[in-house]
Image (cartoon, grey):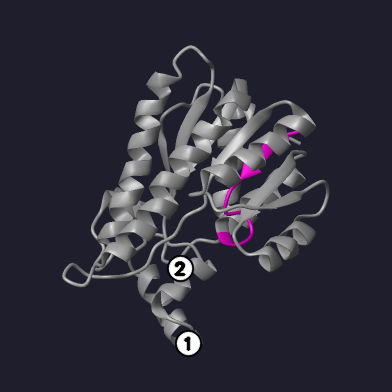
Amino acid sequence: MKLADKVAVITGGSTGIGLAIATRYAAEGAHVYITGRRQAELDTAVQAIGGTAEGARVDSADLAQLQTLFDRVREKHGRLDILVANAGGGSLLPLGQITEAHFDDTFARNVKGTLFTVQTALPLLGKGSSVILTGSTAASGGTEAFSVYAASKAAVRAFARNWILDLKGRDIRVNTLSPGPIRTPGLVELVGSDAGQQQGFLDHLATLIPMGRVGEPDEIAKAAVFLASDDASFVNGIELFVDGGQRQI
C-alpha cells in the first residue's frame, strides 16, 4: 500500500495507460479521480477500478472544466498528493499534409492541457506531492509522419525541466514518464480499425525494441507508482523511459 490515503488525479484515465495507472494507484491505497471526455468510457473505467474511484468528464484543454474538477477535489479532500497529467494523443500526418486543425488539436491536448492541468492544480499540491507528466519516446527520436505529436511531447519534457526551478523549495516533485510503444487503443488506432493491420503494426514496432516486444499498460503503471511514492522522494526532473530499451540504442 505505497499510496495509502493519498489523493490522486489522473487525466485521460478512462482507457489505456491512464486507466492502468489509476487501477494501480487504487490498488496501492490511493483515492483516485480520473478524467475523460466520453462519459460512457469514463463510467466503465470507474466501475473497473472499483474502490473509491471517481470520474469527472473533463476536456483538459478547457480551463473552466479543469477548475471545476480541482474545486471538487479541494472541497472533498483539501489537498492533492499526486497529479498525473496524462490526457493527450495524436495522429499520423507527414510534412506537406499537416493542417492547422491537426496542429491545434495536438498541441491543445498535449501541451495546453498539460500546462493548465498542472497550473490549476498547483494550489492543492503541498509538501511531498508528486506531479507526473506523460511524455513519449517520440520526443527523443524521429518517426515518419509523427512530427507534430513528437514536438508536442518535447514541449512536455521541457515543462518538467523548467517547472522544477519554478517550484524550488516547495518540495513538489515533477517528473516525466515516457512510454515506448504500448499496446493501447490509442496506439493501434493510428493505423485504422482493421485487426490484422493493427497486429502487423505492433509486430513491426516490436522489431525496433531490444526486448523484442511492445509494452503493456500495467508496465507503465508500475513505474508511475514508483514516481508517485515516497520511494522516489529525491527523484525530480527526470525523464523515465519505459520502452524496452528503444531509446537507448
**Residue shown at 56% from the left, 56% from the top:** 17
**Could you tell me residue 104's position as x and y percent?**
34, 57
Pick out the residue farthest to the right.
51
Q: Is residue 211 magenta?
A: no
C-alpha distance separating marks 2 and 1 = 13 Å
Q: Which residue is mark 2?
A: 187
Q: Say above or below: 193 vs 149.
A: below
**Residue shown at 51% from the left, 21% from the top:** 234
Work out whether residue 203 or residue 18 is closer to the camera in this orientation and state it: 18
State the quadrant of the N terminus: top right
| Stretch of the chain drawn in magenta | 2-16
Q: Say above or below: 59 vs 195.
A: above
Identified by mark 1, the residue type is Asp
**Residue shown at 16% from the left, 70% from the top:** 96
Q: Say above or below: 227 vs 25.
A: above
Disc on res. 194 = 1
